[in-house]
Image (cartoon, rainbow, N blue to C red):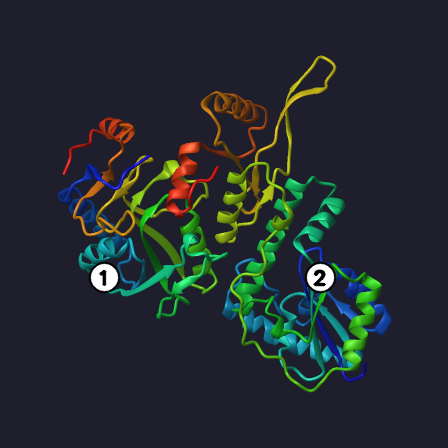
Amino acid sequence: MENVVIITISRETESLGDEIAGQLSQLLNYECIDREQLATLLHEAGQDDLDENIDRNKFLIWAKNVREILYKQTRKKPIIFLGRGGQTIFQNGPHTFHLLIVSSPEIRLKRIMKKYRQDEVTASHILSELDRKRERFLLEALGADWKNPLLYHLVLNTAFYSVDQSCQVIQEAIKNIGPHPVSREQQPLFPSLDFGGNQVEFVHPSEEEFSRILDFYRIKWLYEPRTFPLVWDSEGNVTEAFSPDFYLPDFDLFIELTTQKQKLVRKKNRKVKRLRELYPQIKIKVIYSRDYMHLLQKFGVEDNT
Amino acid sequence: MIESKLGECVFSRSEIEQRVKEIAAVVNRDFIGKRPLIISILRGAIFFTVDLTRLLTIPYDLDFMSLSNFKTGFKKVEIEKDIDEEVADRDVIIIEDIIDTGLTLNYLIRVMEKRFPSSVVTCTLLDCFDRRFIEVPVHYSCFDIPDIYVVGYGLDFRGDYRNLMEIYTLHDPSGRSTQILKQMGKGGSR
């Protein structure tokens, strides 16, 4: 691997990027430099790390310092540079290899649920927040979409490969690297946002139509991800519960569609009221039949429900 | 169900003129010493944009944007007509005819934020908060309206009524719109 002295790894939250970086550094005998180690190196060099109020100009000054420090570091030992916009800092640099590690939202969500021992709703909100923070940093720093595959030599989807297999693929890719520099022509506006909505079986056609409207506006959603117990019997068994139709992680908001008759709406209203009493931290919006009709009318959809 | 016939007057020409003048004065005050980029969202906001910008005394750049409709068969919203001006480091004012669900404006704000503006504010002719389910910031609003279908002054029904100088409801045989307007102290046919 002597032709490559810097491997930059960009990764989505919970895409196994950290695990791959750790294993790869052992296999290749490269030094792995993550955020904390970089901060130490910057501090030793008398330079400031980036603070929360990042902007493009600050990033450019910081990136220049990082480039100098890490090139010096490679004289001692080749490095794996994890995150921090490495693909931009060393863009088109000599003897560099840029790797992007991704995974599907569903799998990352499951990893978060396992790691933090949280249910789907909480985990999806955590994932959404972590993705948002990462995206914000990289967007403000890079001035481009960091998920543009043309910024990288290799994009690896760990939905299909374990950490071991990923390391093998990466080693092969580095061995066979060609001379072409990466380009950054293509800049998709938003990466895929779906949480696997296509596989959902909706109870009511109106819900499916509503999901299409959310998809149209690229708003992430989960279908009936959580059931809230509302009433318990004397032995503590749940006798009444409520599962709102949608959860929008980016807004931490539940949506309930009601296109039913007035009698059933009253029953549902009681449930929503009870939910608000028992779970005051939960944000829920009820879209009633009239609201829904307006929505369909606005979007020019015939009501077939 | 509403019909394509005009209903009652919600905001008269003089009321609209007065509010647009007031909003223009606030924008003039808030953007003093700046040169904002005003982005008018086609097609509904065009009449409001013209009247508002005529009253601005600050320097500004004006551009237009339009988005694809859900009904046109796109799976995802697309920018059909993008702005020509650069957004980076600009103070952006997005002008809408009506903000209701918040879906369109939320998307527009996300698009703008990816272009590194100094700031983004929103300005709307009508704010229908009752229909909102996505939270969006509304910085300047001429009128709050209840959950009724309105046309005129840029807002249309199947392409009609944009050119009206006033804002009307569409005829609502159920009487609901009339009742709501009465509560607002409004009403009156054309």
Q: Whole-percent x and y of residue B94?
A: 34, 56
Q: Is residue A278 above or below residue A138?
A: above
- Direction from residue A113 to residue B158 in the image, left or right: left
Counting other residues with Cα less than 10 Å from the Cα at mark 2, is it few (<14), some (14-19), or many (20 or more)?
A: few
Residue type marked 1:
Ile
Where is mark 2, residue-wise?
A36
**Residue A46 point in image, percent of width and height:** 64, 70
Q: Nearer the viewer, residue A138 or A183?
A: A183
Above/below status of B138 relative to B179: below
Chain of the residue where label 1 is placed in the rendered structure: B
- Callout 2: residue from which chain? A
Q: Nearer the viewer, mark 2 or mark 1?
A: 1
| Residue lying at 57% horizontally and 33% vertically, measured from the top left | A244
Mark 2 belongs to which amino acid?
A: Glu
| Residue that label 1 marks | B58
Which residue is at 51% across, 39% downward? Answer: A206
Q: Quadrant of residue A281?
A: top right
